[in-house]
Amino acid sequence: MIDRLDPLATGDDDFDIPFRPWKNHPAAGVDFPDISITTVDATLTRRMVDELAQRVPAKVEVLAGIDIGGLGLAGALACRSGLGFFDIRKVDSLRNGVMRSIMANYELGEGVVISKGARLAGRHVAIVDDCLISGGTALAAARLIRRLGGHCDTALFVFDIEGMGGRERLAGGGITAEVLRTVPRIAPEGEGA
């Protein structure tokens, strides 16, 4: 990994979101755009959250942050927008006694879970995560939310990795993907670790 910012993210306006590419992660030939370097800068974080807030449909009452990159973003976005939020966790990160329900998702091992405290029946929920890759995790989260009585047809992401099919997969599941920036599948040579 590198400790400098890489302004490779492109979008519809002048706001570049710096990131650090993780070479060949989560698979060979894919470089994951890590925003942790950016999120330590309050000005950039505020602007990123403001841009996400503009994409939250008015009907949304609760945000669901996907473990791990979406958790902090969902909390910040919920605070900024006056919404509630909860976490979507990996199966192994919660004890059975606190899990409400499980949805299989083989991108994150055994699947995704929601803790028992989340009241979702009849509520409109938007998913939040840092990066859209294949869409499998967000789709599993949406299916779980729906199984628990919530309405979920929107997912918000900072990044979408080009050519991975995530937007199409989510669209096939009835979910609109709102993305701030699209990044290349492979960062240029010399970037990342």
Image (spheres, helix red, strand yellow):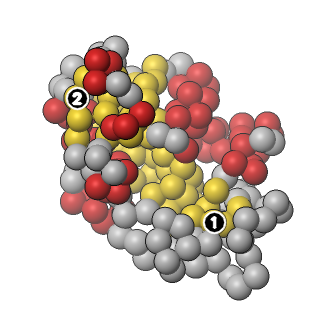
Q: Is residue 34 above or below residue 96?
A: below
Q: Quadrant of the C terminus?
A: bottom right
Label 1: which secondary element: strand
Question: 30 or 52: which is nearer to us?
Answer: 30
User: Three-letter amino acid code at disc 2?
Assistant: Ser
Residue under the image location 21 percent in, 60 percent down: 172
Q: In the image shown, does 159 or 134 lie closer to the viewer?
A: 134
The label on residue 86 is: none
Vertical arrangement, residue 141 with respect to residue 187, above or below: above
State the image quarter where residue 53 is shown: top right
Residue at image location 43% in from the left, 76% down from the top: 163
> Picture coordinates of residue 31 (x, y %)?
57, 71
The residue under the point 28% across, 24% down is: 96
- Mark 2 surroundings: few (<14), some (14-19) or many (≥20) residues within 10 A: some
Would you place residue 50 above or below residue 99 in this image? Answer: below
Residue wearing tag 2: 101
